[in-house]
Image (cartoon, rainbow, N blue to C red):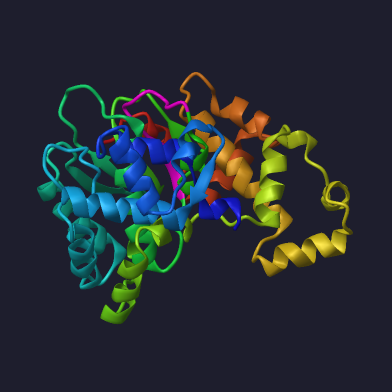
Amino acid sequence: MSEKDTISIHLLREALLQSCAAGVATVEVLRKVGIDPALLELPSARVPASAYARLWRLLARRMDDEFFGMDPRKLKSGSLAFLCRAAIAQPTLATGLETGLGFLSLMLECMPAHLVRQQSLAQIVLLEPEDEPKRAFTYFTYWMIVHGVACWLAGRRIPILAIELRCSPPDFCDDYQVMFSDNLRFDRPRTRMIFSADCLDLPIKRSPQELQRFLAHAPANILVKYRDPDSLAARVKHDLRQMPPDTWPETEGLAATFCISASTLRRRLAEEGQTYQGLKDSVRKELAIVWLAEPQISFAEIAARLGFADTSSFYKAFRKWAGSNPGHYRSLILGDLR
């Protein structure tokens, strides 16, 4: 089993925190779903996503709550199924998301949300009460449901440009970055997910039979199916992130680091539907998005950091990557647009 098909023990402990009494009750629940309770004491332990899903379903049945008891109102058993049935009746992802968010806003007291489309960017914003922020696990469980269902409705991964959260960063973020995005920003004034508005126009073409299969394997399929693949492309992107863009190797140099020829590198990336240039553009976009969220960093400095000859070249590239100019994206991410 690859690591992308497993869940960190940190997330399992978070799931148990509000939904299961410590001690004998926790041991009994874990053994029931095939997880060794001793793993709770091992910080680096991981459990199969399928076992985590069994735990989620067991706790949901016992509590009659598919949200681990993290809201004053229960997300009663069957809520995910109802949400999906309502969403597949809609023509596009935009209307499917609006339907699903409307349902969750009715069911959950503290997490009403709405979808906002602004030119080339879209965001789902949680309209939380002005009280203490929730813990990170609460927010990410919400995003797991919303993003996972959205990906299934569209039949493809919906790339996330950024997720902002009101809470402080948790001790463990690795799984959240793999599930959602490297660009997670904490201690922000609001909680929201930002993605390309083009995705909202994707058609929904899911049958009742496909829904039945999806629900039969949920939430394990939500947890792992639409993650970034554990692939050569992912390894290349990881290596690029460790180096300044102006030091990135040519294809031959990169191939040498993997002990393969340049032609083999190109072929294997092509088999994954990728090119080296496309991966470089993807990492540059990720870095640009992170730096655009820092108002003290000028566009000229970002262009230089990314290895562009001038600011206009950066503008042109960013519009190609994100469908938006850097100024509009910065305005949105800093909350100047409503």
Q: Quadrant of residue 131?
A: top left
Locate the N terminus and report the quarter of the image it occupies: bottom right
- Name the residue at 39% across, 61% down: 151
Quarter of image, res 215: bottom left
Q: Position of residue 149 (x, y in %)?
A: 33, 60
Percent from the top left, x then y, of residue 318? 55, 44
**Residue situated in front as seen by the camera: 92 or 228:** 228
What residue lies at 36% left-to-right and 56% top-to-bottom? Answer: 54
In the figure, 152 relative to 242: above or below?
A: below
Q: Is residue 326 among the parts visible in the rendering? A: no
Q: Nearer the viewer, residue 29 or 184?
A: 29
Tell whether position 168 is magenta.
Answer: yes
Q: Position of residue 61 (x, y in %)?
A: 21, 55
- Which quadrant, please, contains the C terminus? top left
The magenta segment is 160-171
User: Looking at this view, is 44 or 110 the one in front?
Assistant: 44
Q: Is residue 281 magenta?
A: no
Marker count (numbered): 0
Residue at 53% of width from left, 33% of height from top? Answer: 42
